[in-house]
Amino acid sequence: MRAAEIQDDLTQILVTEEQIKAKLEELAARVAADYEGKDLVLVGVLKGAIMVMADFARALPFHAPMDWMAVSSYGASTKSSGVVQIRKDLDTDLHGKHVLIVEDIIDSGLTLSWLLENFESRGAESIEVLALLRKPEAAKVEIDCKYVGFDIPVEFVVGYGLDYAERYRNLRDVAVLAPHVYS
Ligand code: 5GP
Ligand code: MG
Ligand code: MG
């Protein structure tokens, strides 16, 4: 797919690469202060969080192990099903660890509320959430997310790790996907 064709699939850029970079540096400074001297583990939710994890982890001034979990809730649809399935579990034992879940986006909140409940049974010392994006008006359950990048309107977005049918993840900005692509 060529750049011009990709542009036709997008209606609007919501968050630019520069805005993301600045925001992740700001969040990393907060996390660094909050977790100084603590045993912090970053848990990324595949695949959407790969870019957030890569840039956020590199903005931290100390080592923090990364682990990954793959869950499915959407498939190739643009709506959350609320049914969460573990596709890949963690490699790390969370006992006594301070866990920061790194997410791309909180939409209905169903995936995260399920994950938080699941993690609570694993003996972590603390669990917090960092999400680059959040759609407050789409919330079906309240998620206590300590570190939020940007609140956005209820639109289906792609880019910076976020896909539609495995495409657009490599876009540098976050943009609204044109309805003609999926309807
Ligand atoms: P939730 O359970 O909060 O509704 O959303 C779960 C997952 O669905 C998110 O972590 C994300 O991977 C995906 N998702 C939610 N909203 C969007 C969106 O606007 N665009 C894309 N590409 N994925 C989304
Ligand atoms: Mg996600
Ligand atoms: Mg997806």
Image (cartoon, helix red, strand yellow):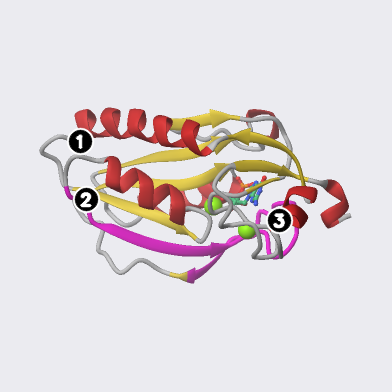
- Residue carrying label 1: 35
Q: Position of residue 168 (x, y in %)?
A: 64, 57
Identify which amino acid the numbered label 1 is placed on.
Answer: Tyr
* Distance from Cα at disc 2 to Cα at disc 1: 10 Å
Q: Position of residue 159 (x, y in %)?
A: 60, 49
* Distance from Cα at disc 1 to Cα at disc 3: 34 Å
Which residues make up the magenta segment?
63-87
- Residue carrying label 3: 81
Residues under numbered marks 2 and 1 in contact, where contact means CB atoms less than 8 Å apart: yes
Q: Quadrant of the C terminus?
A: bottom right
Distance from mark 2 CB to nearest ligand 2 atom below 8 Å: no
Q: Residue at x 26, y 64 (%)?
A: 92
- Residue carrying label 2: 64
Q: Secondary structure at mark 1?
A: loop
Q: Which mark is residue 138?
A: none
Asked if the magenta segment contains residue 77, the reply would be yes
Residues under numbered marks 2 and 3 in contact, where contact means CB atoms less than 8 Å apart: no
* 53 left or right of 138 in image: left
Q: Secondary structure at mark 2?
A: loop
